[in-house]
Amino acid sequence: MRVLGLFFMITIFTIMDITAQQLEKHRWKNRLVLIITDNVESKLLKDQIKELKNNNRGLEDRKLVTYIILPKKYKIEIQGDSSWIESSNLFERYNSENETFKVILIGLDGSIKLEQNNILAAKKLFSTIDAMPMRQSELKNR
């Protein structure tokens, strides 16, 4: 029984480490928008993607990278033609309440800055980021 428990704990820590590595590469380089849904055909997902694509310049200016996260796969950047990566780690980590739709903003420091269960308007996204001290510093140093 102890061996099984030890195996289970090692497995959990390995999964958590892999999940952390997926997003860790962006720390101090990019802010992240995680769009989490249980359905790739979701109207909310399509509307959120459209909202972000219509404001691509603002995304680039604020160093935003977008992840679309489904239960068994995820895709990086909706602006480009990226392919799906098989994994359930991000979905499990960021959707523990099993929501059907969620948007999360992660700052340069890797912490969650905003989380909501409806479409995130670009205006709200940008004003949230623009109020952050790191963003204020970026704007000053231009």
Image (cartoon, rainbow, N blue to C red):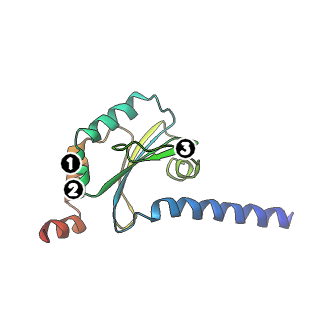
Where residue 142 sits: x, y (%)?
Answer: 12, 68
Which residue is disc 2 drawn over? 61
Tell me which residue sits at (14%, 71%) in the image.
141
User: The N terminus is located in which quarter?
Assistant: bottom right
From the viewer's side, name the closer residue of 101 and 18.
18
Tell me which residue sits at (53%, 51%) in the image.
90
Q: Quadrant of residue 3?
A: bottom right
Tell me which residue sits at (46%, 28%) in the image.
41
Q: Are marks 1 and 2 in contact (CB under 8 Å)?
A: yes
Q: Residues within 10 Å of mark 1 (few under 14, many from 20)?
A: few
Q: CA distance from mark 3 to mark 2?
A: 28 Å
Which residue is disc 1 drawn over? 57
SS type, badge 2 = helix
Q: CA distance from mark 3 to mark 1?
A: 27 Å
Tell me which residue sits at (55%, 59%) in the image.
19
Q: Amino acid at mark 1?
A: Arg
Q: CA distance from mark 1 to mark 2?
A: 6 Å
Q: Amino acid at mark 3?
A: Lys
From the viewer's side, name the closer residue of 118 and 107.
107
Q: Which mark is residue 73?
A: 3
